[in-house]
Image: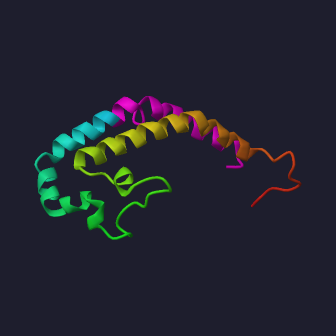
Amino acid sequence: MKDEDFVERVLNRYQELRQTYLSDEYLTNYMEETIAYLGPAIARNDAVWGFSYDATNLTSLQRRRPEEGQTLEEVNPSSYTQAVEWMEGFMLRRGVWLDENIESLRQYCHQSKTATQWVE
C-alpha cells in the first residue's frame, strides 16, 4: 500500500467494478437469480436445518451474540427470507461505506507528517 501507483490502480479498478460486478443492481440481481436457481433446494435445506432459525436451539458458538441492549432475535434471523434480506441490506450498506471510504487508501502511500519513520 506504500506504492502510490498501486493504490491508484486499486481505486480505479474499484470504480470500474462498482459500475459492473459490484454495482447494487448487479449484486441484487445476482442474489435473486441464485435464489431462483436454488428453487426447491431451499425448502429441502430448511427441512433439515430450519431449526437454526430459532436462536434458542443453537449453542452460543453457533449463533450471533447480541450486543448490550439487543436480543437474540434482533441479531439472528428467524427465517430464510429474513436472512436473505439481512444479507442484501448488509451488502448494499457495505457498498455505500466503501464508496465513502475507499479514497482513504491514499493515506497509506504517504509518510505520516508526525512519524519519523515508516511503519513496517
Give x and y (percent) for residue 105: 65, 42
Q: Is residue 17 left or right of residue 86?
A: right
**Is 79 a magenta residue?**
no
Q: Against 24, is 1 above or below?
A: below
Residue in the foreground of this view, choosing between 19 and 94:
94
**Is 11 a magenta residue?**
yes
Residue in the foreground of this view, choosing between 21 and 113:
113
Q: Quadrant of residue 10?
A: top right
Give x and y (percent) for residue 75: 39, 53
Q: Quadrant of residue 4?
A: top right
Residue at the spot x=85%, y=56% of the render? 117
Q: Is residue 70 left or right of residue 7?
A: left
Residue at the spot x=49%, y=56% of the render? 67
Q: What are the residue bounds of the magenta stretch?
A: 1-27
Residue in the foreground of this view, choosing between 68 and 38:
68
Give x and y (percent) for residue 102: 60, 38
Give x and y (percent) for residue 110: 77, 44
| Count of marks placed on residues | 0
Residue at the spot x=54%, y=38% of the render? 98
Is most of the magenta stretch helix, strand or loop?
helix
Residue in the foreground of this view, choosing between 29 and 71:
71
